[in-house]
Image (cartoon, grey):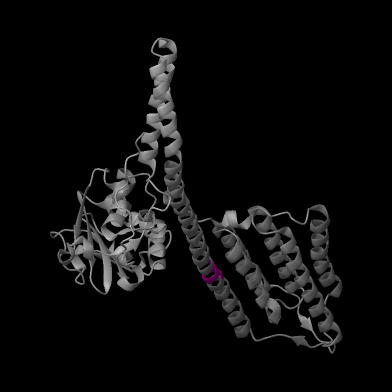
Amino acid sequence: MTQANIRPLDGRTRASWIRLRTMILLRWFAIAGQLTAVTVAQWAFGLQLAFGLCYLTIGASVVGNLVAAFVFPQNKRLSERENLAMVLFDLLQLTALLALTGGLHNPFALLLLAPVTISATALSLRSTLVLGGTAIIAASVLALWHLPLVTQSGDVLRQPGIFVFGHWAALLIAIVFTSAYSRRVTTEVHSMADALSATQMVLAREQKLSDLSGVVAAAAHELGTPLATIKLASTELLGDLEDRPDLAEDAALIRDQADRCRDILRDMGRIGKDDLHMQRAQLTAVVKEAAEPHLERGKTVMFSDNPMARDPARAPTIPRKPEIIHGLRNLVQNAVDFAETTVWIETEWSAEDISVRIIDNGPGFPPQHLGRIGDPFLRRRGGASNETTRPEYEGMGLGLFIAKTFLERSGARLRFANGSDSGWLRGLPPAGSGAVVEVVWPRRLLDLGPDDSVMGENQRLTA
């Protein structure tokens, strides 16, 4: 699975995750609160309400809950439309109850915000707009039409008109602000959760590939002896079957296929199960390995090292962790995607730091996005022209987010800039270079130091 195939889940998909049992339980709490409020208003405060209609309105919710509980299984998950219908019913039922108990003169009118908030956090944008619009209409109707609150002595509890208008305006502002705020925060949380989930998937895939390399190395080592035996036996049979050309041909085929298996295993893996090169390598080797899949994509990729560190003995040896390789690979991919002709990859190290800089001569990062690079699902870097030149590209957000997350997990700091305004960089390529990404690790966190136990070059399997 590539980053281009991973997208954040929309509200319609997430709405289908809500269980009917959860909605029924929440409605029971609402019913209990409504019954308590109506009963207390009657017995404690002596309000003269239309109790028959009030209990009938509450009873509609009770009947709806009982039908949902007995008709549908407990583990049923509601669709987007079913969720919208249930929340809309609750909103209309609450509106009817408020209309029977004073409208906006009733302090419980604030509860109109609850269905809208639930919709903003759990349902799609379309459903939220429907619920929000309905709540605004309901608040406006309640401000104009409602049964008054009458005390036992016949007095009508009524607020001044200016307070009713203020209550109505506050409700409208709260509906819009609360729904927008809740939806924005929920969307951010969901996007981050989706991106972290995609990151874990990519890391798991890279770890499996890394483990597979070790398995292939072990297979090449273990199968070397049997293949040599097969070749030796087939060679002896070939000498003994000189007078039987039909059988000699089969023996020659066995020998040739044994040689082919030997060559395949040699190409797939390295000799030795415990070859330390599988776990560690020099910085430049790891960087080149990370960039290797993008070297033949029609762009020139140039590597350079710090001049003060030309001596290989002084070059840092770092772990070949999947997250480091994949993170650097994503950065190189992004540079190659947008470079016009050339990508420069510079490695530099000192006694304190190890750094890798990836520079391209493309259009650079949009200035308005520089501060947001690394946010998940941020779209897009190169403008509308990318849709025609690279229609499969889905934006730069998730790939750079995964790279940033992986590299920061290894202890790195990342900085993004454009060549025209990257004063903190030294020795840039010629003027006109585009995006610049610098990855810096404290050397003490990454450098494994010299290791004399590292095996030499892998040897070719021979018979």
Quadrant hosting residue 264: top left
Picture coordinates of residue 129 (x, y %)?
Answer: 56, 61
Is 369 or 333 nearer to us in this picture?
333
Picture coordinates of residue 394 (x, y %)?
Answer: 39, 50
Q: Residue at x 68, y 61 (%)?
A: 88
Q: Is residue 348 left or right of residue 155?
A: left
Range of residues picked out in magenta: 179-183
Residue 53 is at least partly visible in this image: yes
Q: Residue at x 43, y 58 (%)?
A: 377
Is 122 or 102 nearer to us in this picture?
122
Q: Is residue 368 left or right of residue 5?
A: left
Q: Residue at x 74, y 86 (%)?
A: 157
Q: Is residue 182 magenta-colored? A: yes
Picture coordinates of residue 185 (x, y %)?
Answer: 51, 69
Q: Is residue 181 left or right of residue 350?
A: right
Is 315 or 234 nearer to us in this picture?
234
User: In this rendering, is residue 86 above or below 209?
Assistant: below
Q: Is residue 233 left or right of residue 132?
A: left
Q: Main secondary structure of the magenta part?
A: helix
Picture coordinates of residue 313 (x, y %)?
Answer: 22, 63
User: In this rendering, is residue 308 above or below 275?
Assistant: below
Is 54 or 315 nearer to us in this picture?
315
Residue 383 is at least partly visible in this image: no
Q: How many marks?
A: 0
Taking the view exactly as shown, the residue that stands out farthest to the left is 430
Quadrant hosting residue 446: bottom left
